[in-house]
Amino acid sequence: MRFLLCLTLFGLPTPGSAQINPDNRLAHTYSIVARDPDTGEMGVAVQSHWFSVGSVVSWAEAGVGAIATQSFVNVSFGPRGLELLKSGKSAQETLDALLASDDGRDVRQVGIVDSKGNVAAWTGKSCIPAAGHFVGKNYSVEANLMLNDKVWPAMSRAFESSKGPLAERMLAALEAAQEVGGDIRGRQSCAILVVIGTSTGRLWEDRLIDLRIEDHPTPISEMKRLLRLFRAYEHMNKGDLAVEKNDIEGANFHYGSAEQMFPDNLEMKYWHAVALANAGKVGESLPLFKEIFKQDANWHTLTGRLPAVNLLIVTKADLEKILAQK
């Protein structure tokens, strides 16, 4: 009922109308689209008092660009916009083409950044206030249904003054939005999507970060924790790669770095212990193994299986020392 009322109030087609677009969805929110000029990375970060906001608002493709489509969302703006960018159109040309084809443009809000750093944004005149956007160098911030009109300026300042990887800088913008009032309805979901600047043709490598908080009382705080966990598992992945290359010291460094970030994570602690043992530092590994085995005996069982697949390369005597830590 609320959805039908909103459609009527804002002049959008209602069910039964010949013009109804099944891609139109509600996603009143604040977001940022941005490009890192140093790395070429592009991304979208968004928060809303709406379930699973990232599944409709956030769109990005390596070597192409990033798009946020929100307010009364025309979801097709995401994939269609990326296709237009891929065809050679700039961010502004893409935005103009999307809006020209949409009778509901007055209730749309869009932010686009292309792979060259061109930026374009739109806030329809019938977006629910407070609503607005700001276009900066290599980024735009956009917001609607906000508690006040301080939100997008605060996002801009936070992004421009922050340092570090693109994802963390975009998250800083979301935090700033919340600190000055944020969405008038509150909080529910959050998402961060980051792709590399030049496509490799391998999607699993092109998409660097794709994190979503679908339903949470404090989604930005949870996203901050999740992003930090992601960085820790980056170390874990590098540790695994070092193991593949028989780089024991490298594995020890990366597993240890991950463990330092999340010292209560048994998985991180376990592979750090294994890396120490493989580096000939069995004595240093024993306290870690003891702590892990005490908390979960399954890790003890796993340890006995590793020598057969060359993931734990120790003498029989050292293996007995390790297994005796239970």
Image: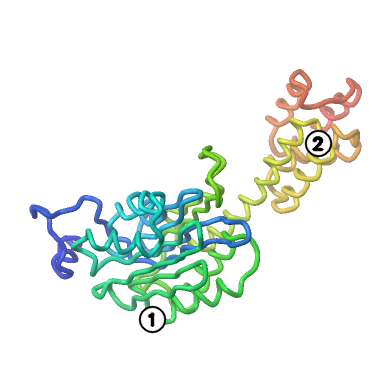
Is disc 2 surrounded by few (<14), some (14 to 19) or many (20+) residues within 10 Å?
many
- Residue drawn at the location 56% of the way across and 55% of the way down: 41
- Residue drawn at the location 65% of the way across and 45% of the way down: 233
Q: Secondary structure at mark 2?
A: helix
Query: Horizontal and vertical percent for residue 130?
Result: 33, 78
Horizontal relation, residue 46 to residue 315: left or right: left
Dividing the image into 4 quarters, which one contains the N terminus? bottom left
Q: Is residue 324 above or below residue 308?
A: below
Is disc 1 surrounded by few (<14), some (14 to 19) or many (20+) residues within 10 Å?
some
Query: Horizontal and vertical percent for residue 135?
Result: 44, 73
Query: Horizontal and vertical percent for residue 24?
Result: 24, 56
Dividing the image into 4 quarters, which one contains the C terminus? top right
Q: Secondary structure at mark 1?
A: loop
- Residue drawn at the location 37% of the way across and 65% of the way down: 92
Horizontal relation, residue 224 to residue 215: left or right: right
Query: Horizontal and vertical percent for residue 25?
Result: 26, 56
Horizontal relation, residue 307 to residue 83: left or right: right
- Residue drawn at the location 76% of the way across and 45% of the way down: 254
Q: Is residue 103 above or below residue 265?
A: below
Q: Quadrant of residue 319?
A: top right
Q: Quadrant of residue 104?
A: bottom left
**Count of picture labels:** 2
Type of the residue with mark 1 = Asn
Disc 2: which residue: 275
Foreground: 294 or 67? 67
Type of the residue with mark 2 = Ala
Disc 1: which residue: 148
Which of the colour schemes (rainbow, by chain, secondary structure, one colour) is used?
rainbow
Q: How far is the residue under mark 2 from the one under mark 1? A: 52 Å
